[in-house]
Amino acid sequence: MQRHKSVEKRDRTSKKANLVNRMNRSRIKTAIRGVLEARDKESAASALKAAVSVLDKSVKTGLIHQNKAANQKSRLSKIVNKIEK
């Protein structure tokens, strides 16, 4: 690595961003898992609402593409709609 101030600062900021991105990707996976593991319709619906919120926030911050979020929301909605009361 070069010994310039700008390179060192870029390395520091990259590490911080990497940590934030890993935490947010983990939040996405946890939210999706909550929907998939829900047993009844009510808990699945509330988990879906939370997952949609997490996905939308991830799109807003640029973590994932909006089409990927839309596909995941659609897939999760289908799963929730198949659950019987």
Image: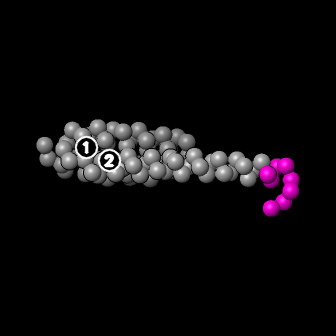
Depth check: 78 or 53 in front?
53
Q: Which residue is mark 2?
A: 34
Q: Is residue 17 left or right of residue 8?
A: left
**Looking at the image, which residue sits at the far right?**
4
As for residue 55 lying within the magenta part, the answer is no
- Name the residue type under label 1: Ala
Q: CA distance from mark 1 to mark 2?
A: 8 Å
Q: Is residue 40 left or right of residue 7?
A: left
Vertical relation: 1 (above or below) 44: below
Depth check: 12 or 68 in front?
12
| Residue drawn at point x = 84 percent, y = 60 percent | 2
Question: Are there few (<14), some (14-19), or many (20+) residues within 10 Å of tag 2?
Answer: some
| Residue drawn at point x = 57 percent, y = 46 percent | 20
- Name the residue type under label 2: Gly
**Looking at the image, which residue sits at the far left?**
85
Q: Position of residue 70 (x, y in %)?
A: 40, 48
| Residue drawn at point x = 41 percent, y = 52 percent | 29
Q: Tell me the magenta residue range.
A: 1-8
Q: Which mark is residue 12?
A: none
Disc 1 secondary structure class: helix
Q: Position of residue 31 (x, y in %)?
A: 38, 46
Q: Identify the coloring.
A: one colour
Q: Position of residue 5 (x, y in %)?
A: 85, 49
The quarter of the picture where the C terminus appears is: top left
Q: Are marks 1 and 2 in contact (CB under 8 Å)?
A: no
Q: Earlier in the sequence, mark 1 or mark 2?
A: 2
Q: Which residue is mark 1?
A: 44
